């Protein structure tokens, strides 16, 4: 029984890789993707991306802010997203001349009802409807015990705003530190929303391997919102560059009741009473970097072998005890 369970776990984990969407061009939604050479970016009626403020579009990157004080910039998809399940991959780079703790402020990735809505939070309004993922490089709260740069996520229905002075701690869903500044390579962020589960993954070392940052269930997000990215500098600054934003559709089956629901009317919310593990059986698998590497397969096989040995030993002991007990009855 133990061996069978172990074998099932290995096979199930291995087959997850078959459903990975990353890099699958069939599921890439170009109308929601920003890629070199950035065609469809601008103010024309046919453009799919608008930009604002200090944003500069080059052939190699979209610079939201230069390494200069008091700059704000953003870029927004003009096409509303009507996907129920999706995965957004962001390739970006934050770099500048500022030394440790002398840089700011960071990048925010938005999936919101409002677009091109300038404000004080990474050049966006503090009150919004939807999802925001913050790549915060400067600590505004002197009493904080967390390490910056820090990545966090927030879902809002417009009733609660982002608390800039506390780095959004009162409303965040989770987060993780990430050393993303002044790397020799680009860094990556993946945001996945599927069947009420929000997962944020990072690849800081450019190893083509995701590491989990946030994983929470009970999240409700509507369709019809817009994706965007924004950044800001204050007295301290950095270059905030977006290299690409790639949107993938996740092929997920929904119940008839879910399909008949008007997803545009869903209120952005989080049910914190629901465990993130409630959605563990996601049929679409997970991110590309969670596929089994060689050493993970080795560890799983080793654990399976140990499990078989333990089961065999326990079985032998139980069998011997039964034999001894049966002898006593003769």
Image (tube, rainbow, N blue to C red):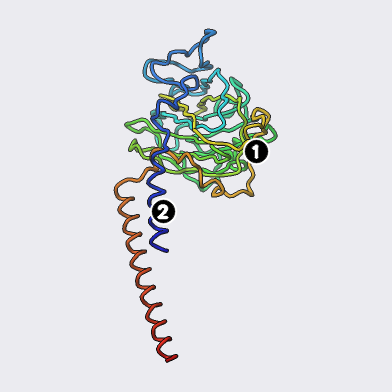
**Quarter assignment of residue 101:** top left
Viewer-nearest of discs 1 and 2: 2
Closer-to-camera residue (242/72): 242
Secondary structure of residue under mark 2? helix
Q: Name above or below for residue 184 compared with residue 280.
A: above
Residue 274: horizontal and vertical position, in percent? 61, 48
Is residue 89 toward the left or the right of residue 275 in the image?
A: left
Task: Read off the residue under disc 1.
Answer: 269
The answer to which of marks 1 and 2 sits earlier in the sequence is 2
Q: Residue furthest right?
A: 159
The Cα–Cα distance between marks 1 and 2, rounded to whole angstroms, is: 33 Å
At x 40% / y 34%, what residue is drawn? Answer: 181
- Rendered image: mark on residue 9: 2
Residue 26: horizontal and vertical position, in percent? 42, 26
Closer-to-camera residue (254/117): 254
Q: Quadrant of the N terminus?
A: bottom left
**Quarter assignment of residue 58:** top left
């Amino acid at each position: 029984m133990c061996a069978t369970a172990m074998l099932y776990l290995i096979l199930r984990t291995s087959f997850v890789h078959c459903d990975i969407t990353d890099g699958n061009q069939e599921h890439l939604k170009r109308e929601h993707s920003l890629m070199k050479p950035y065609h469809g970016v601008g103010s024309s009626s046919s453009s799919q991306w608008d930009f604002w403020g200090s944003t500069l579009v080059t052939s190699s990157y979209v610079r939201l802010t230069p390494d200069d004080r008091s700059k704000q910039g953003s870029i927004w998809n003009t096409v509303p997203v009507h996907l129920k399940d999706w995965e957004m991959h962001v390739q970006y780079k934050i770099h500048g001349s500022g030394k440790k703790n002398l840089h700011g402020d960071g990048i925010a990735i938005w999936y919101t009802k409002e677009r091109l809505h300038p404000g004080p939070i990474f050049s966006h309004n503090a009150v919004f409807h939807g999802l925001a993922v913050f790549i915060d490089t400067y600590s505004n709260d002197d009493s904080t015990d967390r390490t910056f740069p820090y990545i966090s996520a927030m879902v809002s229905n417009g009733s609660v705003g982002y608390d800039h002075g506390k780095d959004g701690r009162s409303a965040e869903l989770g987060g993780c530190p990430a050393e993303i500044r002044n790397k020799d390579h680009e860094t990556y962020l993946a945001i996945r929303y599927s069947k009420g589960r929000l997962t944020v993954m990072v690849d800081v070392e450019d190893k083509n391997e995701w590491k989990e940052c946030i994983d929470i269930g009970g999240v409700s997000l509507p369709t019809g919102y817009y994706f965007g990215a924004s950044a800001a500098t204050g007295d301290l600054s950095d270059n905030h560059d977006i290299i690409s934003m790639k949107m993938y559709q996740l092929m997920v089956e929904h119940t008839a009741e879910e399909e008949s629901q008007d997803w545009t009317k869903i209120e952005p919310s989080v049910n914190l009473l629901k465990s993130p593990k409630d959605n563990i059986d996601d049929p679409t698998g997970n991110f590309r970097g969670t596929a089994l590497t060689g050493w993970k397969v080795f560890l799983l096989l080793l654990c399976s072998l140990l499990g078989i040995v333990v089961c065999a030993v326990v079985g032998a002991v139980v069998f011997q005890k039964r034999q001894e007990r049966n002898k006593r009855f003769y």
